[in-house]
Each structure stands twice: as C-alpha cells, then as structure tokens.
Image (cartoon, grey):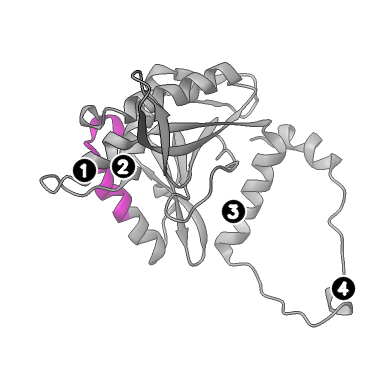
Amino acid sequence: MSAVLQAPAAAALPAWPAIDFAAFGEVEVKPLSRIQGLTAGFLSRNWVTIPHVTHQDDADITALEAWRKNPAKPRLSPLAFFAKALVSGLKAFPQFNASLDATGKNLVLKRYFHIGIAIDTPRGLVVGVVRDCDSKSVASIARDIAALSEKARGRGLPMTDMEGGCMSISSLGGIGGTGFTPIVNAPEVAILGITKAEWKPRRAADDTVQWRLKVPLSLSYDHRVINGADAARFLRHLDEVLAAPEQL
C-alpha cells in the first residue's frame, strides 16, 4: 500500500496514550520480539486502510473427517484440504484471487494459486506460502505446510517463503472458538478463518435427525473489491467442495 493511500487514515489517528503504568502498581516491561513488532505494524496498517467485513458460515466436513481417519489412507492435515478447497474457490470466484495495486485504482487478477498458512511460533505469528497448490496433491500440500511450520518454529522463514500469497488461512481449530475476524493479509483481498468443528443435528428428509460434523468458517474480505453476496457464495462453494474430499 503506497504512502499516499496510508496518509489520510494515519493522519486521522490520535496519538497513543503515554501512561506511567508503574504509578498504579508493580509492572514488568518486556520488549516485543522482532516478529511481533513487524506483525503489529502490518496488521495496524491493514486494519486501518482496508474496509473489513467478515462473513461467517459452517461447512460440513463429516465425509472429510471420515476420509482422513480411514486407516487405509495416509493421515493428512485438514489444513491441506482447506488449502486445496481454496484453490477451487479462487478459480470459481476470480475476484478473490486478486490484489489492488499501490495506487488503489487497478485490480490485478492472478493466474497462479499460492496459499498462505498462518503459523504460530514462539516468536510470534508468521504466514508461510505454499506455492502452486493447483498443481499439487493434498498430500504434497500437507508436506509443504509441515516443512514451512518446522522451519518457522526453528530458524524462521525468509521473506521468499512469506510473499506472493493469493489468499491466507488462519486456523484456530486445534484450540477452539466459534468464529473470529481475521485481518486481511495485504495485498491479498480475503482471508479464511477456521475454528473448532462440532457435531450438530440436522433434520433429514424423512424427519429423522442426522448428526453432521460442522466447522465454522470466518471469511474476512476487502469490501472495496468483494461484496457480501460474493462472500456468501464463496463459503457455500467451499462447503460443497469440502463435502467431496475424494475429488480434492
């Protein structure tokens, strides 16, 4: 985002309050890590300059979990399936696979499919990018995610592993939650948040009750590029794709 676009929003912000917290009791001052400091700056810029909207829906992953737990098949990270499903969504809705240029007047439509994966590390949050997910199998994507995560939690990721993403995934599924508002990772125009799946009842056609495993999805998007109807259709598309894991 260019300085021209940042200036109006930044100029309107009041100064951060300078408070002597020690006047109220005992405190400890702990500097932010380098990654935390960089992330704070980027997230602040993205939140202030991008008009965020978050659309939430559930996706049925009953078949996906049954497929993953089949002892005859390799156990793969669910994130790999979501990354592959995102590729289908980006192909079906090209406005999601785009970025505004630095002037804010042109939309750059991408013909490649690189998916960012938010990785929680002891030093802070980073986003590693898995490249060419359209031409990779789910198993290959799972290996790439594992390799990026190991590198990020070890010596760290170089910039070449963190740039060029088309859309990112931030998953809290292993921890919990029913939804949140992930901040768009500029210059991308959308990000998918995932929280903990739960079994929910569904009324079947014969009036019996079926139990389905539903995962909450939170899609934050740049409202300058994407509208609410697009977002709703995008998550419905992901639901349909995830319901047929054997096709991913």
State yes or no: discs 3 and 4 in contact (Cβ < 8 Å): no
Q: Residue 160 carries which label?
A: none
Say which residue label 4 marks. 20
Cβ atoms at labels 4 and 1 below 8 Å apart: no
Is 15 or 60 nearer to us in this picture? Answer: 60
Quadrant placement of the C terminus: top left
> Residue 188 or 198: which is nearer the viewer?
198
Q: Is mark 1 on a helix, strand or loop?
A: helix
Distance Cα–Cα, label 4 vs label 1: 53 Å
Secondary structure beneath disc 2?
helix
How far across and down, in percent of the image, does residue 145 sit?
32, 49
Q: Tag 4: residue type?
A: Asp
| Quadrant of the rendered image containing residue 70 | top left
The residue range painted magenta reads 132-147
Question: What's the magenta bit mostly, secondary-structure-wise?
Answer: helix
Q: Where is residue 179 in the image (x, y as percent from the top left)?
A: 55, 42
Instruction: Tell us which disc is closer to us: 3 or 1.
Output: 1
Residue 80 is marked as 2
- CB contact under 8 Å: marks 2 and 3: no
Q: Please tell me the numbered disc located at residue 139.
A: 1
**CA distance for labels 3 and 1:** 30 Å
Locate residue 75 relative to residue 99 in the image: left or right.
left
